[in-house]
Amino acid sequence: MLQLETERLVLRQWKPADLPLFIEMNKDKEVMRYFPSTLTDAETIQFYGRIVAEFEQKGYGLFAVELKKDGSFIGYTGLHEFDFDVPFSPGVEIGWRLAAAYHNCGYATEAAGAVVGYAKTLGLKKLYSFTAKINKPSERVMQKIGMQKTGEFLHPKLEDVSPLKAHVLYSLDLI
């Protein structure tokens, strides 16, 4: 079973027991404040299915993240292949989402750093990360893991009137 460890975290493949906690996390308005909306139970179940399938198909994906000290599921961090309509597509994105109780603890940065190391072992040449311009906490994680801002873009899947439409783009060369 594929697993990464840091000082305080375990990044692992998903277990069915994670799903109820994942559903609750994706309903939390604080967690989802930089996304178009919270997710319904059905949307989270579909997302969970896509995460599991990506691991099976690609050999990598979004890891479930748990605390070493007590095994608590706190969110995800990992890799995702994207191919939406932007000039830098297709590519592999590094991303994260943690339950609100675990924000501002350094966990996203710690987990993302481990994922960068893992991506290097896969032979990936470049990682991307992007978020809404207003999402300064995620942008700061990108900076802390050594990514460089390479531009801005309008996310093609968001409405023109959305305050989330304008995105920042970061990248990291792995070779």
Image (cartoon, rainbow, N blue to C red):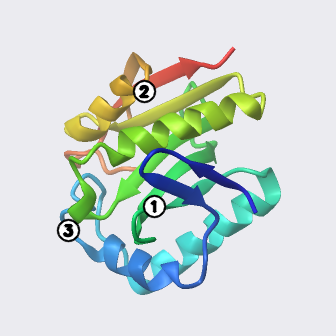
Separation of residues labelled 3 and 2 (CA atoms)? 26 Å
Can the viewer see residue 85 in this picture? Answer: no
Separation of residues labelled 2 and 1 (CA atoms)? 21 Å
Residue under label 2? 145
Q: Quadrant of residue 23?
A: bottom left
Residue 39: percent from the left, percent from the top? 36, 74
Residue 49: percent from the left, percent from the top? 63, 74
Q: Give the label on residue 29, or none.
A: 3
- The foreground one among 68 and 136 is 68
Task: Say which element carries label 1.
Answer: loop
Q: Is residue 56 above or below residue 20?
A: above
Residue under label 1? 68
Residue 162: percent from the left, percent from the top? 23, 49
Q: Residue at x 29, y 59 (%)?
A: 36
Task: Say which element carries label 2.
Answer: loop
Q: Quadrant of the N terminus?
A: bottom right
Name the side, left or right, on which 40 lies relative to 61. left
